[in-house]
Amino acid sequence: MSRDFYIVSIEPHVGIIIKICRAYTNSQEEFEDYYQEVCLQIWKSKDLFKEKSKWSTWVYRITLNVCLTHTKKKYKKVEEQTNGVYDNQSINNTAFADESLNLLYDAIKKLKETDRALILMYLEEKPYKEIAEVLGITPNNISVKILRIKQQLKVLLDGKIN
C-alpha cells in the first residue's frame, strides 16, 4: 500500500475506522490487528469500488465486514477453547484507559451486530441516508432503531456512568 493511497483514501476516514474497530475489540493488540486488516482490505478492494456510493460508505462497509468476520472467527475460536465461556473484560492500556468510554463500548458490544454498527454511525453524525445505505435498511427505519438502541444503552449503562 502506498503512502499516498493511505493519506488520500484512508486517513480522512481514520476516525470511524478506529471507532468501529474499537467497538469490536477488547485489547490494544486486537484493535491494532483489526485496524491493519481494515486498511489492507480497503487497499485490496479499491479497484472494486464502482462509485455507486460515496467512498466513505465503501470504507464503512469494508470496516464493518472485517470487524464482523474477525469477531465471528474470534468467538468461534474462544468457544472451542473455553466450551462457550467468554470473559468480556476490557484490557487496560492506552486505547482502553478511559473508564467511562470503556463502559460505553462494553454496552455497545452487548448490542446486536447491526445495532452496534448503526449506533456507531449515528455517533459519528452520519446522515440517515448513508447509514441506511451501509446497513441495507430504509432511512425511515433508522430513527426508530436509534431510539430503541438509545433505550437499550440507557438500561445497560444505568448507574455505571456518572
Image (tube, helix red, strand yellow):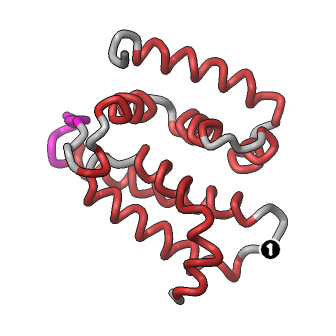
Residue 128 quadrant: top right
Residue at the spot 62% in from the left edge and 66% down from the top edge: 12
Left or right of residue 149: residue 40: left
Q: Residue at x 34, y 57 (%)?
A: 31
- Up/down of 141 relative to 2, above or below: above
Up/down of 49 relative to 92, above or below: below
Residue 47 coordinates in the image, percent (x, y):
69, 82
Image quadrant for the C terminus? top left
Left or right of 70 in this view: 45: right
Q: Is residue 148 above or below residue 17?
A: above
Q: Nearer the viewer, residue 115 or 107?
A: 107
Q: Residue at x 64, y 74 (%)?
A: 9
Q: Nearer the viewer, residue 162 or 137?
A: 162
Reading the image, the residue beneath label 1 is: 50
Q: Residue 74, percent across and down?
A: 31, 52
Image spot of residue 117 (x, y percent): 57, 42
Judged from the image, the secondary structure of the residue bearing numbered disc 1 is loop
Amino acid at pointer 1: Lys
Tag count: 1
Q: Which residue is most to the bottom?
A: 2
- Was residue 82 drawn as part of the magenta stretch in this picture? yes
Residues 102 and 61: in front is 102
| Label 1, residues with CA under 10 Å away: few <14, some 14-19, many ≥20 | few
Q: Is residue 91 magenta?
A: no
- Main secondary structure type of the part rendered in magenta: loop
Percent x, y for residue 15? 54, 55
Q: Is residue 38 above or below residue 47?
A: above
Residue segment shown in magenta: 81-89
Instruction: Please give the name of the residue rendered at 70% of the width and 50% of the height, measured from the top-left corner.
Output: 134
